[in-house]
Amino acid sequence: MELMQPVFDVERRFSRTAAFHWMCTHWKQCFYISAVYVLVVHYIQRKMKERTQFGLRKPLFLWNLTLALFSAVAFYRVGAHFVQEVMRSGWHKTSCSLEWLNGPPGLWSFLFGFAKLPELIDTLFVVLRKQKLMFLHWYHHITVFCYCWYAYVYPHGQGRIFIVMNLFVHSIMYTYYAVRAQGIVKIPRTVNICITTVQLMQMVFGVATFVDAYWMLQNDLPCNVAYHNIIFGILMYFSYAILFAHFFYVNYLKKKSILIEESKVEVSEKKKVD
C-alpha cells in the first residue's frame, strides 16, 4: 500500500531538518513561556474581580472554530497516514517507527506541537469572561505544551499515537466550544459527559501505550523510544487521568447524586404536606 502523498504545496516544501533545527534552538523557551503564562493569567484573574466580565462571544466562536478546523484537518492528514502504515506494516512496527516525522504527517505533527503555544490563549477567554479557572485547565495546557516541544527534539515512535488521539479529541472539543460560544443552541448535559469520557479514555490509553513501550524495551524488542520518554509520558498521562477522573466524579456523579437526594427530599416533604 502506497503511503499518503503531499496534497498541499506547504506539505511538499516541508523540511524536517529545518523544523528540527528550529525546535532544537527554541524548545527550552517553553518553560519560560509557561511561567509567564501562569503569572499573567492569575494576575488578570485577580484584576477581573474588580471589573465587569467581557462577553467575547464572537471572538471566542471564531477562535474555537479555527482550532476545530485545524484539529480536524491535521487529524485526517496524520491519522490517515497512521492507518495506512498499520495496514502495511502492523501495529508494533508502526508504533515504533519515526517515518511519520517526514512528509505530510511530519508537517502536521510539527504544526500540532507548535499550536500548543497559541492554544494558551484559551485561558485568556476563561479569565476575561470571569469563568472558573481550574487547576486542571492551566496545568494541562502548560504540561502538554512543554512535553510536545520536548518530544519533538527527543522523538519517539509512540508520539504519533498521542498526536492522533489529541487531534481527534480536540476536533470534537473545540467544535463543542464553538457551538456553545454562540449561545443559540442549548447543548444537552450528556454531550459534556461524553466529551469528558473521551478525554478520560485518552489519558488511560496514553498510560497503556507507554506501558506497552516499556514492555518492549524490557523484552529487547526494537523500538524508537527512550526510557526518559516513557517516564515523563507516564507521569503526565497518569496525572491527567487522575485529574479528569476527579473532574468527572465531582461534576457528573456527585452532582447527580446530590440532585437525586434533593429530589427525594422534595417528594418526601410534599407527601407530608398532602
Image (spheres, rainbow, N blue to C red):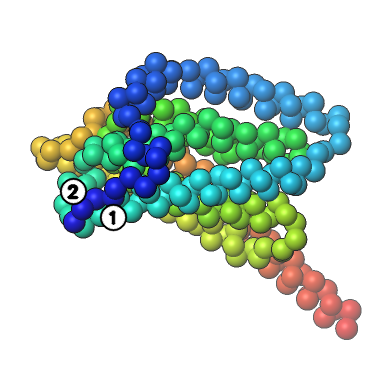
Q: Is residue 34 above or below residue 127?
A: above
Image location (x, y in percent) of residue 179: 66, 56
Residue at the spot 23% in from the left edge and 39% down from the top edge: 99
* Residue 36 percent coordinates (x, y): 60, 19
Q: Amino acid at mark 2?
A: His
Q: Position of residue 74 (x, y in %)?
A: 43, 46
* SS of the residue under disc 1: helix
What residue lies at 35% left-to-right and 51% top-to-bottom?
Answer: 79
> Mark 1 is on which residue type?
Val
- Residue 118, above or below 5: above
Circle count: 2
Left or right: residue 140 versus residue 261 is left
- Rendered residue at 80%/30% (across/down): 48
Crowd around label 1: few <14 · some 14–19 · many ≥20 (10 Å): some
| N-terminal label among 1 and 2 | 1
- Residue ID at (66%, 65%): 188
- Counting from the top left corner in percent of width and height, residue 68 is at 55, 49
Q: Quadrant of the N terminus?
A: bottom left
**Alpha carbon distance from label 1 to label 2:** 13 Å
Q: Residues within 10 Å of mark 2 (few under 14, many from 20)?
A: some
- Element under disc 2: helix
- For this view, does 143 lie left or right of residue 207? right
Residue 204 appears anywhere in the view: no
The quarter of the rendered structure image containing the C terminus is bottom right
Residue assigned mark 1: 83
Q: Which residue is mark 2?
A: 92
Q: Quadrant of residue 118?
A: top right
Vertical order, 31 against 263 (above or below): above
